[in-house]
Image (tube, rainbow, N blue to C red):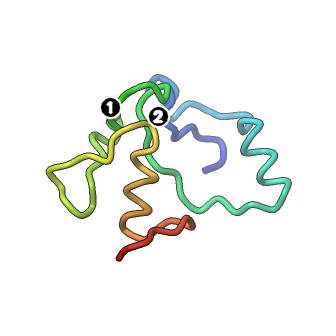
Amino acid sequence: MPNCTTNGGYVAWINQPQTTECSVVETLLRAGAVMYARTTQPQAVMHLETETNIYGRTVNPWNLDLTPGGSSGGESALVAMRGSVLVSRVD
């Protein structure tokens, strides 16, 4: 979302005007990447669970009593519900 910080990297930055993208995002966009989703992550990406003051706890889509955990919990939940460009193999 242009001109609006929506990432939970630092909660204090939410809804603050954003003048630039981070260098990784800028590089990906210049290479032709299409951003279609932003998953949640713990503040500063330094927590054993994916929980934020903004969105709450990320839960496992197959068992809402469990959390996918870790800094990539939002992406792993997206993979589990087959909403990611990454492949989830289900036997």
State which tag comes first along the sequence, 1 or 2. Answer: 2
Please name the amino acid that badge 1 sits on: Asn
In the image, residue 53 above or below residue 6: above
Quadrant of residue 56 in the image?
A: top left
In the image, residue 85 above or below residue 50: below
In the image, residue 75 above or below residue 53: below
Please name the amino acid that badge 2 sits on: Gly
Quadrant of residue 78 in the image?
A: bottom left
Residue at the spot x=60%, y=50% of the render?
A: 1
Residue 53, disc: 1
Crowding at dot 1, Cα within 10 Å, few <14 / some 14-19 / many 20+, comes out as few
Helix, strand or loop under label 1: loop
Residue 19 image offset from top left, x and y in percent: 72, 34
Residue 13 image offset from top left, x and y in percent: 52, 27
Q: Distance between the residues labelled 1 and 2?
A: 8 Å
- Residue at numbered disc 2: 8
Residue 27 image offset from top left, x and y in percent: 81, 46
Residue 84 image offset from top left, x and y in percent: 51, 65
Which residue of the protein is positioned furthest toward the left in this rendering? 65
The answer to whether the residue labelled 1 contacts the one labelled 2, judged by CB atoms less than 8 Å apart, is yes
Query: Is 24 or 90 nearer to us in this picture?
Result: 90
Query: Is 16 or 61 nearer to us in this picture?
Result: 61
